[in-house]
Amino acid sequence: MAEKKEQQIRVEDQVRALIAQIESIRAEIAALDAAINALRQTVATLRTLKRLGQGKNVLIPVGSIAQVEMKIENLDRVVVSVGQNISAELSYDEAVKYIEDEIERILALRLVLEQTIADLYTQIDQLIRGAQGEEQSEEENK
């Protein structure tokens, strides 16, 4: 009887650990979703600025409470962060393509994380079914 209780506790601990992993991965997915949304907004803003064209006035945020008026002069070149505080000047089309490629890379990582969650749920299901199966076997043997 004590062995059965110990086995049940081990299964519960394993299930809790797997659920904790799932929650951690969900948090990572949420961060990836935020990055994807920010990148998509960047592409949309670039496209809008290109559509507005040269000579249009726009308000540029300076910090969180101020904006300054600026005139669109040249959108043929865009400075894009390429990582580790390094930026590269790209043509407008190259910049949009670079950002869209980054979105695709993040979406691929997101897909891997979603599959990992599915695998963890499968492990949880197997643990629970295994524990239930052992209980049924023990009851049938009595």
Image (cartoon, grey):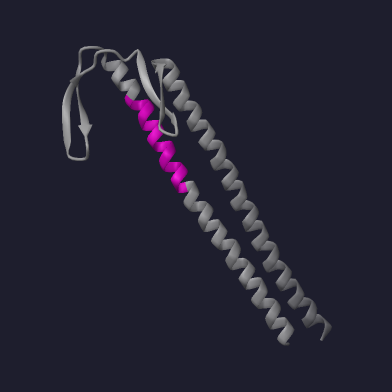
Image position of 76 with respect to 44: above or below: above
Please state if 14 lies on the left or on the right of 104 as rendered: right
Up-down: is 85 above or below 128? Answer: above
State the residue lying farthest toward the right.
Answer: 141
Left-right relation of 97 to 68: right
Which quadrant is home to the C terminus?
bottom right
Is 31 inside the magenta-drawn segment?
A: yes
Give the residue drawn at x 36%, y 15%. 77
Quarter of the image where the N terminus is located? bottom right
Task: Give the percent coordinates (x, y) of residue 47.
Answer: 34, 21
Considering the whole magenta stretch, tell me its main secondary structure: helix
Tell whether 139 sits left or right of 17: right
Residue at image position (65%, 53%) is 119
**Front in this rendered view, residue 128 or 17:** 17
Counting from the top left corner in percent of width and height, residue 132 is at: 71, 73
For residue 94, above or below residue 7: above
- Residue 105 magenta: no
- Is residue 21 rendered to the left or right of residue 100? right
Q: Which residue is found at the position 56% from the left and 40% from the top?
A: 109
Q: Which residue is drawn at 47% across and 21% down?
A: 97
The residue range painted magenta reads 30-45
User: Residue 140's spot in the image, x, y percent?
Assistant: 81, 81
Looking at the picture, does residue 41 appear above or below residue 76?
below
